Structure formats: structure tokens, C-alpha cells
Image (tube, grey):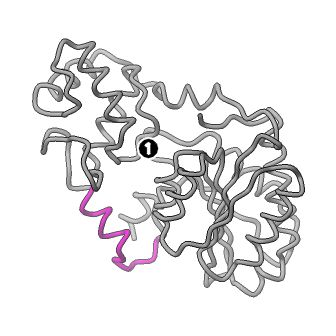
Amino acid sequence: MSFQRQRGLHTSGSCDQHTWMALVEAGWRLGDRLLVLAAPQLRGDDIAELQDDLNRLGFDCGRPDGIFGPATTRALVDFQRNGGLTPDGICGARTVRMLELLRRQTGSGPGVASVREALTTQASLRTLRIVVGQFGGLSAIARSVTRRLRTSGATVMSTDEYEAAAQAAAANRFGAHVYVGFEARSDNRSMCSYFAVPTFESIGGRVLATGIAENWTTSLLPAPEVQGMRLPVLRETRMPAVLCSLGPIRAAVDATDAVTDAVVEAVIAWTSGISPTEA
């Protein structure tokens, strides 16, 4: 449970698939292996370290999610070209040594990815592309939120894929500006989660999650805790994402109208220039 808490996962105390994968990824350190764009994409803490270094040096590879994808490859090639290395997009021993050398000469700021997110805003609800997802048991809430957002002028796609990776992939293909998901809990607890790791947090996700919590009016469910986490759907979406975990299911369904009000009001405020979003 301590490991799950540290990794931003649900603290179930069970070594489920997500926890096992996190354990495997935690075993890698930068320089342990060659990093290259592959299929399936490589994942690990060594990649997150690489992304963090590149972002701090001004080579924007997006959020440090620990996934070696095209954006990381482009940033790496740019870094190698600027550093006089072979720009092959492969992070090997020479690239690691150059990163270690430059790392000692840089500050400890948030990096270019965080700065970019803080400077980018979404102008209007009518230009917003939203994906609303649910993982079983809360389809009534997902349908209600989808319907209300569409009535308000947003372009909305809904998904109830079982796997988080499938929902994230659908949101990425859709070119969504924001993802809002719902999952049921068995206990009497509510949580609004956004993507965060020790070196980065999604500002847009945090502001939206906080807005939902602040607009909470129902007494059927406890007010949601706002927490930065590294849950799969938050990690793999390329846009600000919020996952609302609500329980118990019956109380959550009974509070559908109130939950819908809180989410839609938060999204409207989020698009009015009050809050920043990711590009």
C-alpha cells in the first residue's frame, strides 16, 4: 500500500495488474538499457527521468509519463542534434552522459512542459472537444454529463471501454481538449484525481478537479478529495484529464443530477479563461 500510494495508484493492498506493471517500471534507471521508439512503446522510470531532463533543458517532450512515444523521440533527436550527437532518437550511453553533464548545470524549475501548459488556454465551450468515460456502474452519470455538455454547445464523445488504455487511446484519437471519467467505488468516499508525478502536475487537470469539488452540493455523497495521481487513464491521455471516483454506486446514481451540475459548471468555468489547459 505504501508503494501504491507513492506511485499515485489506488491503495488496495492487492498486487493487481497496474501495481505489478508499476513495480516492473520502477526497476529501471536511466542508462540501464537502450531507449528507442518501439511497438509496444517502452515504459519505465528511466524514460520518465529522460523526459524530465529534456523538459528542464527546454526540449519539450510533453508530460513525463514514463512512456517512450513520438513526442519524446522528437525532443530527444532535437537534443542530440543541438548537443553534437548522432540524432538517431536512441538514448544510449553517450546521450546519457551528455544529459548527466548538462543536468548539473540546470536549475530545478518545472520544465518547458509545465510552462507550456500554464500559458495555453481553451477559449470557448463551443470549440471544446470532450471525452466522457465510465468504467462500469455509473453509465447514468456519464450519459447525463454528456447530454448536458452537448446541450451547452461542446462536441462530446462518450466511451465505456473496460480498459483504461482503450479509453485514453479513444480520447487521443478524438483530439480531445479534456477527458472526464467516472468509476464506482465500494466505500463511502469520493475523489477527483488528475495526473501528477513528483516532477510534474497537469495544471489544467488540477484546476478542473478542484472546480468540480468546489461546485459539489449533494449530501448523498461526501465532498470529493482532490488528489494528483498516476492512474492509467490519467497517465495515458495527452490532454488534461479528471477521474471522478464515487461510492457507493447507489448513492452516486441517486446523485446524478447534482454530480452533473458540478461537472458541467466546472467545465464551463474552465473554458472561460479562468483556468489553463494543455496543448
| In the foreground, 33 or 217 | 33
Most distant residue in the left direction: 93
Q: In this orientation, which residue lies closer to the viewer: 19 or 222?
A: 19
> Quadrant of the rendered structure where residue 119 is?
top right
Asked if residue 21 lies in the magenta stretch, the reply is: yes
Residue 110 picture location, percent across and down: 48, 29
Residue 82 appears left or right of 172: left
The quarter of the picture where the N terminus appears is: bottom left
Residue 234 placed where, x, y %? 53, 55
Report the quarter where the C terminus lies.
top right
Q: Secondary structure at mark 1?
A: loop
**Image quarter for residue 124?**
top right
Provide the residue span drawn in magenta: 11-25
**Rendering coords of residue 233 (x, y %):** 51, 60
Task: Decide whether the magenta segment is chiefly helix, strand or loop.
Answer: helix
Residue identifier under label 1? 198
Query: Residue sitting at 29 percent across and 20 percent down?
Result: 79
Question: x, y percentage for residue 212?
Answer: 77, 56
Number of numbered tags placed on the structure image: 1
Q: Residue furthest bottom?
A: 250
Q: Is residue 25 above or below residue 271?
A: below
Q: Residues within 10 Å of mark 1 (few under 14, many from 20)?
A: few
Residue drawn at x 83%, y 60% as measured from the top left:
262
Reply yes or no: does residue 147 show up in magenta: no
Q: Is residue 31 left or right of residue 271?
A: left
- Identified at 68% across, 74% down, the residue is 246
Amino acid type of the residue that numbered disc 1 sits on in the rendered structure = Pro
Which residue is painted at 36% across and 38% down in the image? 70
**From the viewer's perspective, is residue 112 above or below residue 157?**
above
Of 237 and 56, nearer the camera is 237
